[in-house]
Image (cartoon, helix red, strand yellow):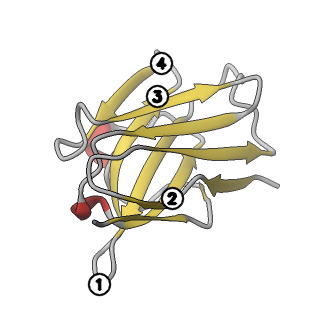
Amino acid sequence: QVHLVESGGGSVQPGGSLNLSCVVSGFPLETKLDYTLGWFRQAPGKEREGFSVFSSRDGSTTYEDSVKGRFTISTDNAKNTVYLQMNSLRPEDTAAYYCAVDVSLRPSALYWKTIGWDYWGQGTQVTVSA
C-alpha cells in the first residue's frame, strides 16, 4: 500500500518562504523503475493544477511558468521524501498543496493534468497574506 503524507504548510506573509515535505511510504524512491513525482495545488473554487514535476529517469525537473525561479522540487531517497521549497511567495500562491506519484515515466504533455497519477497525498494548506 502506497501512502503520501504532506506537511509544512502554514500562513506566511508575501515574500516569505515555506518548505513542504511529502513522505512516501510503500514505494521506494531509490527504485530503478521509472516514475514521476508531481506537486499540485488547488485554490478555493478552482481546479487542481500541476506546477512542478520530477522525472526519475534523468532526475530532471520541470516547472510551470508561474512558479519558475521561485519553487524547487527535490528528493531525499534516504528519507523517501519529496520536498517543495517555495520562496518569494505571493497571495496568489494560496492553495491546498498536494504531492502525487505516477509509477511510470509521464509524458510532458500530461505533466500538469490530474488524470493518471497513481497516488495522491491528502494535502497541506498554504496561505499567503499580509
Give above or below for 16 relative to 12: above
Q: Quadrant of residue 93?
A: bottom left
**CA–CA distance between discs 2 and 4?**
20 Å
Sequence order check, earlier mark of 2 and 4 = 4
Asked if disc 3 and disc 4 are in contact, CB closer than 8 Å, the reply is: yes
User: Could you say whether the residue bearing mark 2 is in a helix, strand or loop?
Assistant: strand
Q: Quadrant location of residue 68?
A: top left
Q: Position of residue 19 (x, y in %)?
A: 51, 42
Q: Which residue is at the far bottom?
A: 45
> Is 88 on the left or on the right of 20, as rendered?
left
Above or below — where is 32 with respect to 38? above
**Furthest-front residue in this view:** 130
Q: Is 77 rendered above or below residue 123?
A: above
Q: Looking at the figure, which quarter contains the C terminus?
A: bottom left
Mark 2 or mark 4: which is in front?
A: 2
Q: Amino acid type of disc 2?
A: Tyr
